[in-house]
Image: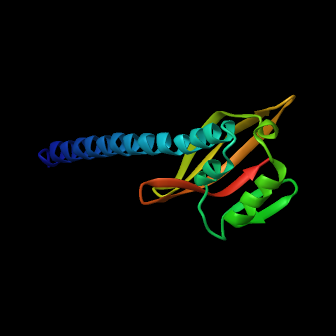
């Protein structure tokens, strides 16, 4: 009986060490993926600030199920979202300078992430609010498939 206690104790220690190591590996994997998700938003801001809506739209999944949701309603489809942007932002001056801040990323699983934070556009005046986007990992690229911008 006294021999079982040390064996059980050693077994528990091994489990704790294995799980602890797995947790570190998983967090490292997600920290790399988090950087990739944030990079999508940074590329979008850079493209926006260059006045390049086409490059800005590269951050979205290019299909009919992509959604853009605002207080005014929902727009379905990459092409329709692009048309909406082109209608409202006809030149670089109207686009102003876009900045994302306080970005946080949560992973729902290894292929779906939610990023949220604040956005601000500076033109003659500043305006902004909050956003929440859902991104899906396609091969090695993260792309937005649902955008809630308020």
| Residue 38 position within the rendered picture, expressed as x and y whole percent measured from the top left | 55, 40
Q: Nearer the viewer, residue 94 or 38?
A: 94
Residue found 59% across the figure and 61% down from its top: 61
Does 75 sit above or below residue 44?
below
Numbered disc total: 0
| Residue 77 position within the rendered picture, expressed as x and y whole percent measured from the top left | 70, 67
Residue found 75% across the figure and 64% down from its top: 80
Does 53 sit above or below residue 68?
above
| Residue 106 position within the rendered picture, expressed as x and y whole percent measured from the top left | 56, 46
| Residue 55 position within the rendered picture, expressed as x and y whole percent measured from the top left | 61, 49
Q: Residue furthest bottom?
A: 64
Where, by quadrant of the figure, is residue 143 drawn? bottom right
Coloring scheme of the render? rainbow
Q: Residue furthest front?
A: 91
Q: Nearer the viewer, residue 79 or 71?
A: 79
Residue found 38% across the figure and 46% down from its top: 26
Does 16 sit above or below residue 85?
above
Q: Nearer the viewer, residue 138 or 12?
A: 138
Q: Is residue 121 left or right of residue 106?
A: right
Where, by quadrant of the figure, is residue 67 drawn? bottom right
């Amino acid at each position: 009986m006294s021999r079982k206690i040390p064996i059980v104790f050693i077994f528990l220690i091994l489990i704790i060490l294995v799980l602890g190591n797995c947790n570190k590996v998983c967090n490292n994997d997600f920290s790399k993926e988090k950087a990739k998700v944030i990079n999508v938003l940074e590329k979008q801001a850079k493209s926006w600030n260059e006045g390049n809506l086409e490059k800005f739209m590269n951050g979205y999944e290019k299909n009919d199920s992509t959604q853009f949701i605002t207080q005014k309603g929902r727009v379905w489809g990459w092409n329709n979202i692009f048309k909406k942007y082109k209608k409202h932002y006809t030149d670089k001056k109207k686009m102003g300078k876009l900045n994302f801040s306080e970005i946080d990323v949560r992973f729902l699983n290894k292929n779906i992430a939610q990023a949220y934070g604040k956005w601000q556009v500076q033109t003659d005046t500043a305006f902004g609010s909050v956003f929440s986007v859902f991104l899906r990992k396609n091969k090695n690229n993260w792309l937005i498939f649902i955008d809630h911008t308020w």
